């Protein structure tokens, strides 16, 4: 086929979709394993500037492995965070590799603060964990390292569909957001590094558009744990400035410390119970909810602890702007999302041969964290480091796959079907805008009583908005190529929201971050299960799979 916008056919040994920290880490690691492989990174914006690692947080999780054994942290995490749904073997591997990953980042050019004796400068953040600051140019440094190793880059091209043959990925298709050129990529192995689904609500997090999740779903890959995509963070009401660890100092209008209603001992980061408490207090007319800044020594101070020129500049500007509008310290939860359900094994390969998924696109799909959304996943700093971990871990298997597979010509009928789907919004004379669809989805996921502190009734309300958006999305109309990206991102949001709420409706219990008002107890007897989603001939099919907890060391109590 010939696209009226032009066509380019390319081939490579390894195609990496996404130029954030996960994709860049994979690219460098693959080249370190096998310098002779051709590695191509395709990014819809600009690799090195994309993703979330450079959007303001800039922290890495740190484990003192001389003091804490990996299995001790895993036991804590299983009991207090993931609540018995996590893959303990994979989590142990992540913790064990902590210092290796930090050293690799330094080797790749990232600036990590160190003490005079050469040790990393760390700050404790919770039980058994600490953080290290990393400057916001981390992704640029890793891209520069990748380029020196011979990795090739194509920016401003949005990969839209995966092409498969006999259960194996053979490549992908996409389009230029500059001139609309249609691209085909033949590849021996493909790595998805496209981020999570964040529904474009939280500014710092909004680069997670779920397009890789949608690609994997359309290609027939299994998705796992889609219900754990409902992270929320306390923010200032006026500025939306995030209040990291602010849940420790919450007060109602009567001056009562409401943190004591849901937190009885030190915990790892914010829990969904803090969001539920905010909702209950506001529903009982005990708002506004404010923070006592004289008690909160963590929020603003955390981001200025380390020598980070780019980070300090960012946070100084952020705090000064917030101070202009925050006349009081009222807070509310802001829905962020962090859905990451693409299922992978311990090599980060999906259920489609030759297709890998790393970082925030597959964090929950890996099952490592259990019943918690993607990073921060109640462990601040785990986002960047998990992405690096997954990129490093997938490299050896990806190289093996690329060396053993032959390039297969892409099925032209599938390529034509992809092109027709991709350009459809441009061909419509009338229709809705991407914003029309996105706003409906945000009305479904945004209210925390529908997405975090859930009930059957409120899930049903959310699904009404999702179903309305699903019908409206059939009429999406784009006016240019940038708008075309927005249309496809809106379609991905609809898909992700549908599987999230339908899976949430299935899970009739409360576990970890997942919280239902109508099923407040954890049900180990009935719900030690993963929820699996798969596209079967166009139908979204749900099933469950028993968690193989008996093979792991930390066991749940089952009455």
Image (spheres, helix red, strand yellow):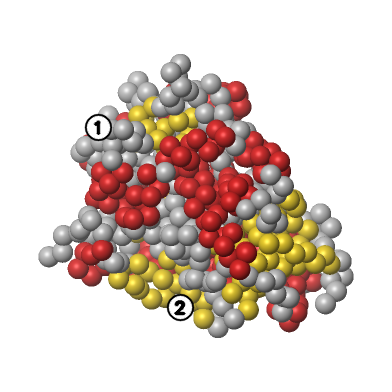
Q: Residue at x 34, y 33 (%)?
A: 64
The numbered mark, 2 or 1, whose residue comes first in the sequence reads 1
In percent of width and height, residue 356 lies at 55, 62
Q: Residues within 10 Å of mark 2 (few under 14, many from 20)?
A: few
Locate residue 108: give its quadrant.
top right
Classify mark 2: helix, strand or loop. Answer: strand
Q: Is residue 277 above or below residue 554?
A: above
The x and y percentages for residue 327 are: 48, 26
**What mark, if any, has residue 475 been given in the picture?**
none
x 36%, y 25%: residue: 296
Q: Could you tell me if residue 433 is visible in this image?
A: no
Front residue of 372/201: it is: 372
Residue under pointer 1: 256
**On the image, which quarter does residue 215 sit in?**
bottom right
The residue carrying mark 2 is: 541
Q: Nearer the viewer, residue 40 or 127?
A: 40
Which image quadrant is residue 235 in?
top left
């Amino acid at each position: 086929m010939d696209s009226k916008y032009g066509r380019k056919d390319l081939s490579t040994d390894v195609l990496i979709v996404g130029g954030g920290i996960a994709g860049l880490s994979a690219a460098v690691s693959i080249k370190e394993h096998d310098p002779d492989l051709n590695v191509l990174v395709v990014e819809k914006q600009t690799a090195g500037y994309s993703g979330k690692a450079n959007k303001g947080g800039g922290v890495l999780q740190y484990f003192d492995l001389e003091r804490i054994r990996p299995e001790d942290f895993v036991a804590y995490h299983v009991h207090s965070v993931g609540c018995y749904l996590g893959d303990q073997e994979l989590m142990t591997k992540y913790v064990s590799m902590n210092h290796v990953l930090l050293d690799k980042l330094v080797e790749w050019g990232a600036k990590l603060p160190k003490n005079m004796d050469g040790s990393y400068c760390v700050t404790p953040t919770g039980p058994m964990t600490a953080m290290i600051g990393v400057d916001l140019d981390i992704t640029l440094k890793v891209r520069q390292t990748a380029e020196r190793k011979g990795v090739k880059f194509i920016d401003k091209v949005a990969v839209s569909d995966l092409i498969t043959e006999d259960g194996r990925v053979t490549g992908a298709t996409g389009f230029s957001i500059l001139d609309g050129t249609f691209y085909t990529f033949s590849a021996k192995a493909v790595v998805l590094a496209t981020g999570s689904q964040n529904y474009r609500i939280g500014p710092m997090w909004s680069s997670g558009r779920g397009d890789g999740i949608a690609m994997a779903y359309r290609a027939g890959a299994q998705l796992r744990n889609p219900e754990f995509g409902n992270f929320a963070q306390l923010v200032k009401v006026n500025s939306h400035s995030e209040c990291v660890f602010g849940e420790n100092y919450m007060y109602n209008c009567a001056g009562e410390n409401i943190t004591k209603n849901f937190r009885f001992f030190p915990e790892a980061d914010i829990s969904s119970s803090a969001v539920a408490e905010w909702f209950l207090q506001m529903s009982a007319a005990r708002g506004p909810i404010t923070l006592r800044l004289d008690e909160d020594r963590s929020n603003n101070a955390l981001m200025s602890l380390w020598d980070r020129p780019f980070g300090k500049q960012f946070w100084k500007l952020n705090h000064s702007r917030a101070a202009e509008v925050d006349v009081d310290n009222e807070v509310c939860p802001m829905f962020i999302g962090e859905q990451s359900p693409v299922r992978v094994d311990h090599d980060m390969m999906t259920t489609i041969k030759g297709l890998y998924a790393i970082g925030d696109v597959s964090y929950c799909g890996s099952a490592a964290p259990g019943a918690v959304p993607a990073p921060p996943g109640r462990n601040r700093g785990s986002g960047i480091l998990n992405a690096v971990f997954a990129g490093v871990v997938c490299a050896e298997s990806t190289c093996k796959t690329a060396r053993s597979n032959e390039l297969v010509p892409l099925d032209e009928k599938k390529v034509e079907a992809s092109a027709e789907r991709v350009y459809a919004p441009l061909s419509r004379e009338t229709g809705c805008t991407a914003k029309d669809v996105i706003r409906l989805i945000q009305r479904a996921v945004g209210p925390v009583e529908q997405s975090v502190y859930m009930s059957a009734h409120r899930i049903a309300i959310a699904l009404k908005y999702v179903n309305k958006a699903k019908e409206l999305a059939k009429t999406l109309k784009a006016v240019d190529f940038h708008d075309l990206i927005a249309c496809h991102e809106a379609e991905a949001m609809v898909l992700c929201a549908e599987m999230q709420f339908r899976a949430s409706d299935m899970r009739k219990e409360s576990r970890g971050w997942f919280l239902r008002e109508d099923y407040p107890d954890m049900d180990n007897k009935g719900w030690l299960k993963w929820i699996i989603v798969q596209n079967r001939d166009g139908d979204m099919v749900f099933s469950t799979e028993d968690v193989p907890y008996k093979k792991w060391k930390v066991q749940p109590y089952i009455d």
